[in-house]
Image (spheres, rainbow, N blue to C red):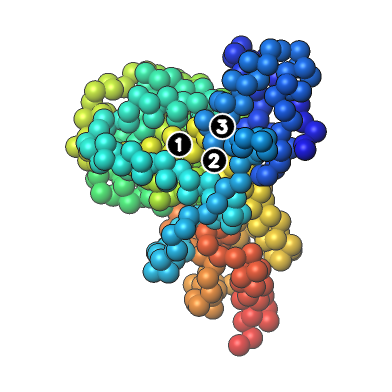
Amino acid sequence: MKQWTPDLRATGKPRYIAIADAIRADIQSGALSPGDRLPPQRAVAQELGVDFTTVSRGYSEAIKRGDIESFVGRGTFVRRLRASAEKPDPRRALEEDPMMNMPPEPDDPEVVARMQQGLAHVSANLVPLLRYQSAVGSLQDREMAAQWMMANGVIPDMHRLAITPGAHATVHAILTYLGQPGRVVLCDRITYPGIRAIAAQLGLRLVGLEMDAQGMTPEALDHAIQQYDPLALYLNPTLHNPVTLTMSLERRQQIAQVLARHGVPLIEDDAGAFVAKSAPPAISTLIPDLGWHIAGLSKCLGAGLRLALTTMPDGAAKGGFTQVLHTTHIMSSPISTALMSRWIEDGTAALVQTAVRKAAAKRQTLAAKVLEGCQMRGQDHAFNIWLHLPEGTNRAEVMGRMTNRQIGIMPSDAFTTAAPPEEALRVCLGGPISLAQLKDDLHALREAISAKGWSG
């Protein structure tokens, strides 16, 4: 039997809820493991100095959440999860795009089983989930999304929160809502390639601004606003794709001050919001009347969900933006949103998040070791590195030498909005590639950019 006593923190919640929360927290931290037998309820009640009924209700709540299970005559145990009896379709394993910046995929059987269990819950509600629903997500799902945001240090405003069909589609919808083809949209000189495609499709002119080690400089932004009278600024300030930097709080405050002074809207593509562990507050929180905040779920829970948690500015016409979402996408998939909600509610989302962070940090350490001495940039929880090539080395030739490798590599051309592209590559470390294969491919990449690699 596990020697365990729940830690009842002062949260203001009823004590039985606090007991269930403590059980889940200790499962997620590893203090309780699948199969552990919990102490009898009377022993826990005596240890905590509470009524037996309180502990009984706490255990019942944890059973309802799916965290523990009870057997008459045997006791109460941390639930052992079983993987689905369905066998995977090998054709599905081929459905991937290695050029995308994907998170490492969960491979712990317990985590995968929890994810599959969420699908089983969704399937029990399948018929109503096949109906048309709200363009901004149901109240139930938005409340669960708000709970996830708060758990990750993002303070939501339910009146301005929408569940939208992925960050890319949301950026498209925001720029459609803001309208005015021919206007300028400002961004970093090196930026997410999706914004380039969106701007081109909507007839907007994308202008990239100079960056330093912290990202866009406030001086460059101030000058560009006066020169171009832009429609909006697009930024990716946390785990920037592709250069991996995270903007400091001081720089975020400076950017917010410039935007507020000129009244320019911000589209904050915060793809790393739920991946980075200690990023400063979103810029949008500093300018709530101008900032659109898009917290995508692709990087922490999976791109296949195609979901983002989007907070609209105070000054935006919610009805107008909702109408754009409805016109362009009708709604986010209710099946995906239900799965998201279930994973948040039963703790699976936190388990996946932890697994992704650990795997990303491990892969960053591997890349730093294999490519030691190379000019590269990465961060613990980023899914890629930004690799500058040695003088005299050509990015096209390096990519040619890596053609038959599994590792995803993209040249700087795809990310550059101003000035000639530099000799650099985005090297993706995540996705389905195994750690062993990644190590082999990184060694091949080092060979491809070395003097020996060019000797033929």
Residue 39 vertical position relative to residue 98 in the rendered view, above or below = above
Looking at the rendered image, the disc whose residue lies closer to the viewer, 3 or 1, is 3
Which percent across, then down, holds residue 67? 58, 36
Q: Residue at x 70, y 61 (%)?
A: 366
Give the quadrant of residue 415. bottom left
- Give the left or right position of residue 415, taking residue 109 as reference: left
User: Considering only order in the chain, which callout, 1 or 3, is on the residue closer to the N terminus?
Assistant: 3
Circle 1 crowding by C-alpha within 10 Å: few under 14, some 14–19, many from 20: many
Tell which of 46 and 29 is nearer to you.
46
Circle 2 crowding by C-alpha within 10 Å: few under 14, some 14–19, many from 20: many
Label 1 with label 2: CB-CB less than 8 Å: yes
Tell which of 266 and 213 is nearer to you.
266
Which percent across, then down, holds residue 437? 61, 70
- The three-letter amino acid code for the residue at tag 1 is Arg
Between the C-alphas of marks 2 and 3, the distance is 15 Å
Residue 421 appearing in the image: no
Instruction: Say which residue label 1 marks.
Output: 342
The disc placed on residue 56 is none
Q: Residue at x 70, y 24 (%)?
A: 41
Circle 3 crowding by C-alpha within 10 Å: few under 14, some 14–19, many from 20: some
Residue 21 vertical position relative to residue 187 in the rendered view, above or below = above
Residue 12 vertical position relative to residue 366 in the rendered view, above or below = above
The disc placed on residue 348 is 2
Residue lying furthest front: 73
- The three-letter amino acid code for the residue at tag 3 is Ile
User: Considering only order in the chain, which callout, 2 or 1, is on the residue closer to the N terminus?
Assistant: 1
Image quadrant in which the N terminus is located: top right
- The three-letter amino acid code for the residue at tag 2 is Thr
User: Considering only order in the chain, which callout, 3 or 2, is on the residue closer to the N terminus?
Assistant: 3
